[in-house]
């Protein structure tokens, strides 16, 4: 059974770079696309982007200039970097498996706050 | 980018009620739509994929329908554990999009 676990700092200063990692277990990371999604407080879900094991990516156009998603197949991990963060980037960040376009398995989520 | 508009944004209902949530796409997406349930402090849970296919383990009181631009999620008889926020999500294009969400509250 597939399991995903997010990890990374819970507090990031404004203008710095948010960095998170998702560790995948129970399935080959090479068989699927993998995605990041976030939930800002009081708002709805926002798709950030996804990556294939080959490194091929697609990003939300509204975040594209600040987002980088990468994958390390040897560690069964994929990562998110979001640069130049502001308070608007405060959110619970989730990693998820992309099946046939739907997101069928999710991590538990990790809260990242942007504050000085 | 394809936009998804959910309605209503919130609703109040009683246990046993039939509940319908709609999701409208800004352009045709065939049947490339999923529905999720999210409870406070928890990750979203996939309910419906390909507009009308029930995810394994999801109760049969949940159903989805629609194609093109108009979709619905129906809960045939609302149960206490169904009070949550529901989201639609499209995957017709290479860019994924979520609807704004519908919060289902207890009347």
Image (cartoon, coloured by chain):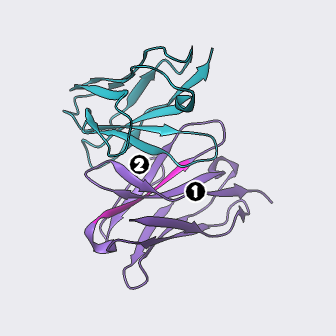
Q: Calculate the distance from the C-alpha at mark 1 to the C-alpha at mark 2.
A: 23 Å
The residue beneath circle 1 is A109
The hue of chain A in the figure is purple
Q: Which segment did they paint magenta?
A: A32-38
Residue A109 percent across, percent down from the top left: 58, 56
Relative placement, left or right, of A106 versus B47 is right
Relative placement, left or right, of A114 versus B2 is right
**Residue depicted at x 72% and y 59%:** A14
For the residue pair A62 and A48, the one nearer the viewer reads as A48
Residue A48 percent across, percent down from the top left: 46, 53
Residue A33 is inside the magenta segment:
yes
Residue B44 vs A35, above or below: the answer is above
Query: Label 2 marks which chain's residue?
Result: A
Image depth: mark 1 or mark 2 in front: 1
**Residue depicted at x 43% and y 24%:** B6
Query: Label 1 marks which chain's residue?
Result: A
Are the numbered discs 1 and 2 placed on the same chain, yes or no? yes
Q: Which mark is residue B52?
A: none
The hue of chain B in the figure is cyan
Kindly give the residue lying farthest to the bottom in the view shown: A74
Residue A10 is inside the magenta segment:
no
Residue B63 vs A102, above or below: the answer is above
**Residue depicted at x 48% and y 32%:** B86
For the residue pair A65 and B93, the one nearer the viewer reads as B93
The residue beneath circle 2 is A61
């Amino acid at each position: 059974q597939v399991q995903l676990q997010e990890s990374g700092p819970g507090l990031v200063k404004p203008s710095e770079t948010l960095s998170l990692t998702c560790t995948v277990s129970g399935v080959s990371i090479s068989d699927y696309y993998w995605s990041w999604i976030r939930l800002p407080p009081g708002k709805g879900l926002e798709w950030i982007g996804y990556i294939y094991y080959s490194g091929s990516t697609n990003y939300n156009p509204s975040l594209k200039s600040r987002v980088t998603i990468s994958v390390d197949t040897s560690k069964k991990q994929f990562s998110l970097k979001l640069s130049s963060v502001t308070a608007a980037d405060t959110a619970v960040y989730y990693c998820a498996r992309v099946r046939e376009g739907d997101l069928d398995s999710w991590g538990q989520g990790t809260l990242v706050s942007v504050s000085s | 980018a394809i936009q998804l508009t959910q309605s209503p944004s919130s609703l109040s209902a009683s246990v046993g009620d039939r509940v319908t949530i709609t999701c409208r796409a800004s352009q045709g997406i065939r049947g490339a739509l999923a529905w999720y349930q999210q409870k406070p402090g928890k990750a979203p849970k996939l309910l419906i994929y390909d507009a009308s296919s029930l995810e394994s383990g999801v109760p049969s009181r949940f159903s989805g329908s629609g194609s093109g631009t108009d979709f619905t999620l129906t809960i045939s008889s609302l149960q206490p554990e169904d009070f949550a926020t529901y989201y639609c999500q499209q995957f017709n294009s290479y860019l994924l999009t979520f609807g704004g969400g519908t919060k289902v509250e207890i009347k």
